[in-house]
Amino acid sequence: MTDDIRDDTPEQEQEQTQYEYNSRLPFLRDKANRLPLASGVYLMKDKSGKVIYVGKAKQLKNRVSSYFRGVESHAFKTYKLVEKIHDFDFIVTPSELDALVLESSQIKQRSPKYNILLKDAKGANYIKISGGEFPRLSYALQKDDPTAVYLGPYAEGFTIRRTVEDANGIFRLPTCSRVFPRDFGKERPCLNLHIKKCMGVCTGRISADEYKSSVDSALRYIKGGSKESIERLTLQMNTAAERLEFEKAAKYRDQIAAITRAEHSQSVMTERTYAFDLLAVSQNAGLSAVTVIKYRDGKLIDKENFFLGDEYPPEETRYDFILNYYAKDETPKELLLDGEVNDRELLEEYLTGKRGGKVTVAIPKRGEGLTLVTLAKSNAAEYLALRVGRTSSEVSALEELSKTLGLSKTPQRIECYDISNMGNESIVAAMTVWKNGRAFKQGYRKFHIKTTQGANDTGSMAETLERRLTSLKEEREGWNERPDLILLDGGKGQVSAVKEVAERLGFADIPLFGLTKDDKHRTRAVTSDDGEIRINENRRVFKFLTEMQDETHRFAIGFMKQSHAKQAHSSILEKADGIGKKRAENLLKTFKTKAALKSATVEELKAATKLSDEKAENLKKYIEENL
């Protein structure tokens, strides 16, 4: 490890140089520019000298120096990292593959704060056989019942849970909370008896010996597998039939059929007999989760969910996760991903070396592979939705929208704009806000169009966004939250006009698109400078954008009608004795609604207009007769 580049920046100069993010940037930038153009690993350190991030680079100089240039445009995670970097070390390696291997080793050894770190989700998993005359089979995480017998521990919790569920279902064992024999005949049997998922122990008609025989069969199924159980049950069925015990033979026949169905449901999803894993990333609310689903011998054997915390770029998330996860887990022959990953070929080479055989990292686009990856993606979205308090459809819609529009990250705050008018009058604009896939009504805003003349939607939209972005630039209270995506009701004309405004005000980096409608006023496509992006084939994106556009249109129409009504009332009030435009506006501002204005007392009208007693009484009569 090298340590020959010293801090040559005078202390006084460092104290005088104040950066918003890190006062050490000049030194770090200079040090990075003197690194070699060789592959290697870099280790970022905080003030205490602790390593907080480990990375690998094909060219150390280019990669490390990129951290200290254009800090303002970094992703949030990188920005927070750069803020904490006090110094860094580096190790030159013979090749990029060697750098990858060393990076994995260093991450595992040091557990740096800003790398994706995985907690070992594999705890102890047991099959519990409770005590008593009528024992139950269940899945358990701890051996906390001294009267029970436990099988295990097992590593793969998903498989054990599913095996217990299958065994209880096949052999029709009870899973309710009733206690036997205490609760015999106390309540009517539940639905499980009628749909043949339970033998009905609660009726009191099942003897303890008959029940234990079924429990023993379930345990043999768990220990010996489906093939052995089918062979044994077939023999018992035939023996019972020869003895003319047809009821017992039918019970064995049903158990054989149930085992066959369970086995089929586990393997129906794939005909691949080799080991492969599915890996999918889900992101929402600035957070990330990953799901790994494992298949061995054509069967789904395990599923693991990981909550990663801060949102990383998805291709970086997949890279870091794979590097960490397979440093301590069995490497399969094939890894199917839900999207792009950094350095895919290099990862394949690294995993191949670790496995001792060829490993393929693939991103399926069609067929069974895509179906399987979609399953993993759905699981990741469901898991993250539970963590962030959103539905899986909201999480998926945001991710798919980000992918459709080619955004660098999943947008947390989306602002949607629409213009509404009644001819050349009552021209208004509306802004709706969507946070993490849901309407955020506290953020809604209304605009009266002030400078644009006539029914000019393009000019009105440009004026609206100029006022909005100016407020953002000046950090005005209530307006200083930056959008991750701006959507406009309109086509290329509106997009071009607003982009010019955004560039002039320094917000060219905010993604901006138009929402165009068909001749039936339904959302048809997304418009950018490069043309249209069709969304009809993506159900989630289509539904989400349509919902946003409809809600913004509703809000704009409501404001326009309200504004038009006020203008009409103002015009009527101006005709009253002693009431000009200013007093009419004051009246509407004070009483807000037509009903409140009509119910106002003479004294209240006098206070709002500063009229004499006589004129205030005349105004009261005028309002009652004309409004």
Image (tube, rainbow, N blue to C red):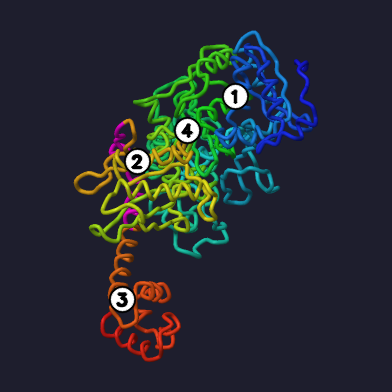
| Cα distance in 3D space between marks 1 and 4 | 17 Å
Q: Which mark identifies residue 574?
A: 3
- Depth check, mark 1 against mark 4: the one in front is 1
First in residue order: circle 3 vs circle 1? 1
| Cα distance in 3D space between marks 3 and 1 | 64 Å
First in residue order: circle 2 vs circle 4? 4
Q: Is residue 534 magenta?
A: yes
Please state which of residues 252 and 355 is positioned toward the viewer in this rendering: 355
Amino acid on which the number 2 mark rests in the picture: Ala
Q: Regarding mark 4 in the picture, which secondary structure is present there?
A: loop
- Depth check, mark 2 against mark 4: the one in front is 2
Residue receiving disc 1:
66
Q: Regarding mark 1 in the picture, which secondary structure is present there?
A: helix
Please state which of residues 304 and 596 is positioned toward the viewer in this rendering: 596
Q: Which mark identifies residue 497?
A: 2
| Cα distance in 3D space between marks 2 and 4 | 23 Å
| Cα distance in 3D space between marks 1 and 2 | 33 Å
Amino acid on which the number 3 mark rests in the picture: Glu
Q: Is residue 451 visible?
A: yes
The part of the chain drawn in magenta is: 531-554
- Which residue is pictured at 47% across the width and 48% down the height? 470
First in residue order: circle 3 vs circle 4? 4
First in residue order: circle 2 vs circle 3? 2
Please state which of residues 391 and 315 is positioned toward the viewer in this rendering: 315
| Cα distance in 3D space between marks 3 and 4 | 54 Å
Instruction: Give coordinates of residue 179: x percent, y percent.
Output: 57, 57
Residue receiving disc 4:
408
